[in-house]
Image (spheres, grey):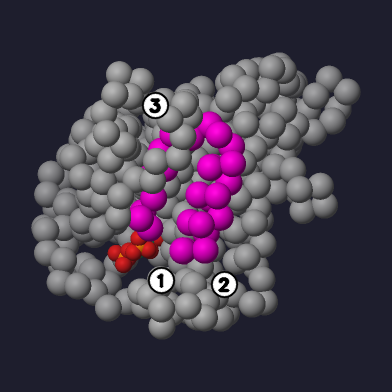
Amino acid sequence: MSSRGGFDFKTSASGNHRAVTDDGGIVTLMEYMGKGGENVGDELVVLFSHLEYACKRIAALVASPFNSTLGKTFGAVGGSDDRDKPKPLDIVANDIILSSLRKSGKVSVMASEEDDAPVWLADDGPFVVVLDPLDGSRNIDASIPTGTIFGIYNRLVELDHLPVEEKGMLNSLQSGSKLVASGYVLYSSATIMCTSFGSGTHAFTLDHSTGDFILTHPHIKISSRGQIYSVNDARYFDWPEGLRRYIDTVRQGKGQHPKKYSARYICSLVADFHRTLLYGGLAMNPRDHLRLVYEANPLSFLAEQAGGKGSDGKGRILSLQPVKLHQRLPLFLGSPDDIEELQSYGDVQQKVNPGYEV
Ligand SMILES: O=P(O)(O)OC[C@H]1O[C@](O)(COP(=O)(O)O)[C@@H](O)[C@@H]1O
């Protein structure tokens, strides 16, 4: 048994850790963040308690028998013709999170993949939240896993004097290296919140009987190499030469790691990344598709905190300065040695993007 952050960690025969209190009890997310654990500060705890509540509502919604109607895309929402139509689930998820963050009083601005511009919430909110409320929502009707991705920054107080629109935008365009915390919530057979406050990556599993997120995966360590690559393989003929050579090499077991790699692709970023964190290897989307602010930065932060890497195929994601809120880029996440080997092929970013239909 070892001790970290005020809690003891028991190691099972399989090598997994489980956090326990002195009296053998379990550790909830709120306890872990609080004074007996990481002590991240009361304001962040309040923010997380609201985010946690919102994500539990989304978890219930994606598992609801009524979401087969809710999940359908009805085109633009908001016009008078749309008044009685159900909203797509990613818009509903966005509304749920916005309302929770507003109630927390701890968020000055929220920038969401679903909104054209950041939404200013409270002048004195200490934090900025960027998020993708329901990634992978195209999978909902087949009950394939989806997820919420979020990043949290401090409000830049030196910008307080600027007009709301301007300071909202500049606060939301902070570099990933300034993240205070980030995370995702995976809605799958289990609902899992995986998060980092800058000292390791930890996953908490929702206990539906109590409504608490329980620490189940403290200090996740991604293996230096894996044996799995995750990519939309049907795009092979649109890939650049370097990426084709890399994938051809590792699937034949002729790479630096002399093992034949296997392919896995759920086409739901949170699920593909979660598997990669736990099993190692690479999760990638080589075309300009995923968003720097809402997806690449928060997930790269988690990858690095677990000992892995987040790259755009050339260099470190967290060192990039976002210039546009909805900026898209190629994304490669995973085991450090696998990412380095991939980058050594040079030409791995997909330049052509012909507009795929599925
Ligand atoms: O079509 P591709 O290139 O395989 O992209 C799939 C990726 O797109 C996503 O569905 C996100 O796309 P959206 O932001 O358009 O929903 C990810 O969950 C998934 O990893």
> Which kind of residue does numbered mark 1 sit on?
Gly
The tag on residue 99 is none
Residue depth check, mark 3 versus mark 1: number of the one nearer the observer = 1
Residue at 52 percent of width and 63 percent of height: 92
Q: Are marks 1 and 2 in contact (CB under 8 Å)?
A: no
Residue placed furthest toward the right: 23
- In percent of width and height, residue 196 lies at 51, 31
Can residue 106 be seen from the camera position used here? Answer: yes
Residue depth check, mark 1 versus mark 2: number of the one nearer the observer = 1
Labels 3 and 1: the sequence-earlier one:
1
The tag on residue 155 is 3
- In percent of width and height, residue 113 lies at 36, 54
Report the span colored magenta: 90-115
Q: CA distance from mark 3 to mark 1?
A: 30 Å
Labels 1 and 2: the sequence-earlier one:
1
Labels 2 and 3: the sequence-earlier one:
2
Question: Label 2: which residue?
Answer: 143
Element on which disc 1 rests: loop
Q: Report the front residue among 3 and 214.
A: 214
- In percent of width and height, residue 286 lies at 23, 55
Tell me: residue 319, above or below residue 151: above
